[in-house]
Image: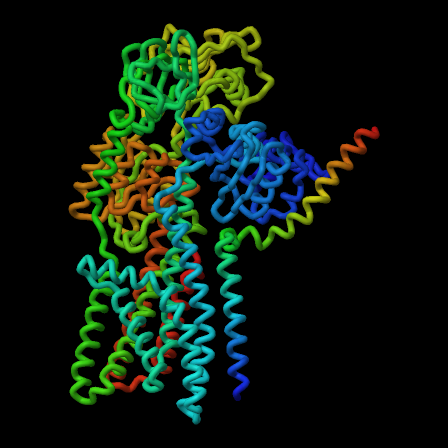
Amino acid sequence: MTSCFHCNELVVTGDQFTTTINGHAQPMCCPGCQAVSQAIIDAGLTSYYQFRSEPGNRQTALVPEQLTQYSAYDLPEVQQDFVHKQGNVDTTSLSIDGITCAACAWLIEHKLKPVQGIDKVLVNSTTQRALVSWNNDTIKLSEILQLISQIGYQAAPYQVDEQEKQSKADSRKFLLRLGLAGFATMQVMMFALALYTGYFTELDIEFRDYFRWVSLIFAAPVVLYSAQPFYFSAMRSLLSGKLNMDVSVSIAIGGAFIASCVATIQGNGEVYFESVSMFTFFLLLGRYFEQTARQKASVSSSNLHKLIPLTAHLLKDGQVTEIAAKQLRINDIILVKPGEVIAADAVVVSGKSSINEAMLTGEQMPITKQIHDNVYAGTINVEQPLQAKVTALGQDQLVAEIIRLQELASNNKPTIALVADRLARYFSATILSIALVTYIVWSFISPEDAFWVTLSVLVATCPCALALATPTAVTCATAIFTKLGIITRKAGVFEKLTQIDHVVFDKTGTLTCGHLTIGDINIEQPYSQQQVLAIAAAIEQGSLHPIAQAFKPFFDNRYVVTDIQHHVGQGIEGIIDRQKVKVGKLSFVLPEHSEPSRQHHSQHIYMSIDNKLVAQIEMLDQVRLDVKDTIAKLSGANIGLSIASGDSSGHVEYLAQKLGIKDVHSGLSPQGKLSLINRLQQAKKVAMFGDGINDAPVLAGANLSVAMGSGSAIAKNSADLILLGDHLSRFNDAISVAKQAQNIIHQNLLWAFAYNVIILPLAVTGHVAPYIAAIGMSVSSLIVVSNSLRLLRIKL
Amino acid sequence: MSIIYVLIPIAMLFVLIAVAIFFWAVKSEQFDDLDRQSVSILFDEEAKPSVTDSQTETKSEQQL
């Protein structure tokens, strides 16, 4: 078997598709890859194939219909949300799907740069985004998007996560603080070494004080600038009447620095500049890890929030104009063409068509709508043009209702107190009281040492290792998750994952792929299966019905169809070779037959040629490949399983039986799903899997929620975890990684505590010299960091 | 030993310069895309030959 030169998938079509690259005909798996590679070669960008380190994206990946229609991005009302205008130069940031390595970034830049009207292109392969500036007189945004899609990437403006705006600025500040602390700590350590030698050999007072002053100069920016986040966090927590780790951290840093300054000026006592600097540096390192992990997560979740402009065709005085959905008024008449998303809740005033309401109900098969029926914003018209009168806008729409339900649910979400936070509270309280007791006791024994001993207690017990224990492990685990294609969107996911004991699945799009494929085929002689499928594909080629999509791969341009007629909710007919071909329901294909009434777990469509039945084709919503495996492993781990589906057909029961899930709930409304979860939550910690808008409230309400990468933006918005690539089995991997991370965190905490328990009595009795405190602290921090790094070597 | 009164301030000056460069680098987004920039030098060199390749191709086509 050869594999596709562009995407590395197996080529099953022989040498039907090839592209000539550097004089060799290279095999391609599909027309998509062929077109893309041809576009790359034509643009003179052959080096892409030389330098890429990852294969390209398979081009047949289903792109939502809305994304292929770029013209709506040119409307000024749509652009005002994401385009920055300056004179006639527009600038915007686009999220680009399909960037696999640095070569992709190079490819996109070089494809766009020579284009007239484009001022600047900067592609960032880490965030998978491009910053594009263009001259709006010469080129339109839709044309730019089109150009990018020609070479196989899907670009779209995105909604910047609130979290991301915050965290980008934070990350940069953190890097500055960390870098400064790093530079300064190195210097201070160098002088500290000189001062340490003073303990063993004679060091002139003159030089000692000189080194102390130099250390003070280097430590000052660390304490005054780099350590600021700790002070703010400590103040915040004190104001809210709580103690956190940062309170004892701030007291230690502030106390040690001030005491060391006093000692330097007076030329007596001890200086702790190196401890303070190193301590700040290590703590910042932990925070920085945490920050970058959070930053990465918020960037990828922003990227998933594509801004798809919702436009409507307004029908006024016999004229059709395309306007942005937000300009619609109640009682406006809109024209909804096949394939379009309905822009507002409306009532049909003319026409008859099927509407795909999967996003609201989870039910996949389109529902036939005619005059006086209600249609809802966000649903998709499948067959015929419709005219509808707008009845509700904005907050009054059915979708808004679901969003409200989601917000309500997320406010009632059960919270998990993180172990580290709880520990920090007790720890800080204990250390502070021990320090206080030490001071009081020592002021009776020898008042002049009391301050220094108390200080060494605070420095020696500084919860550096403790503060690093969780963030380093979480960072490593997050890195593995990213490699696995799992995005963690919220903090505390690792802790939650290990506690889950019940999993609820949505059906369509989660357990199943969410699109129909062809199952068993019964064929009458003399036709072959290939012929039948090719004829069906030819007939269905213009249709947007989910059934038609299943035939797409079998399209063969040898069959030419004329006179195609769509019959809403029935089927399609057309003429091939002067023969009348009908594809659809049995009652449509052969009028003398009536539709078999028995409830079947699957659906059949029929084909007739010149009123003679030719084939019966079973349509299946294929179960995801790894579902069985995933479910077996989950139940093996004693995790309860349920299905909660909005679909009311018999397919849910059939699927549950096939997969061995006993607890099945079908035909549930979003509200119904939420109350099911709430009921389960009384006894268990529940994880919910979902992908649709109708799953959003229940995802927001579950202890842990998992959205599929292909799911709707609103579902992903309420999820804790997002599975990219839609591999369910990754969830099992996620659990095992989380368990190991949990182990590592416990080991780290144990070590940090053990260290503190050993050093505390020594410090309290005044036996810890400053260099011992500093060395002990760094060694324990290093042990914690390297223990966390072991996570990266996990084999799954 | 008194030479350290001169040498240490010089060392401090170097550190100051290093910190200033680091701050400049962070602020001018040098650290924003670490995956890409490490290899970008390879691409740009190869871009020209491939462009000239296609140019010479079109030229030879014109000659034909």
Q: Where is residue B20 shown, x and y percent of the image?
A: 50, 63
Q: Where is residue A169 shown, x and y percent of the image?
A: 40, 51
State the image quarter where residue A446 is shown. bottom left
Q: Which sits in the foreground, A112 or A583?
A: A112
Residue for point 41% across, 85% down: A209
Position of the C terminus of chain B by quadrant = top right
**A38 horizontally vs A439: left or right:** right
Q: Which sits in the foreground, A670 or A29?
A: A670
Q: Specify whether residue A127 is in view.
A: yes
Residue for point 29% across, 63% down: A231
Question: Looking at the image, which residue sits at the far bottom?
Answer: A202
In the displayed structure, A774 sits above or below A410; it is: below
**A174 horizontally vs A498: left or right:** right
Residue for point 52% across, 17% down: A538
Q: Where is residue A304 shown, x and y percent of the image?
A: 41, 39
Q: Where is residue A106 shown, x and y percent of the image?
A: 59, 44
Question: Looking at the image, which residue sits at the far right?
Answer: B63
**B2 horizontally vs A475: left or right:** right
Residue for point 33% across, 40% down: A717
Q: Specify whether residue A476 is in view.
A: no
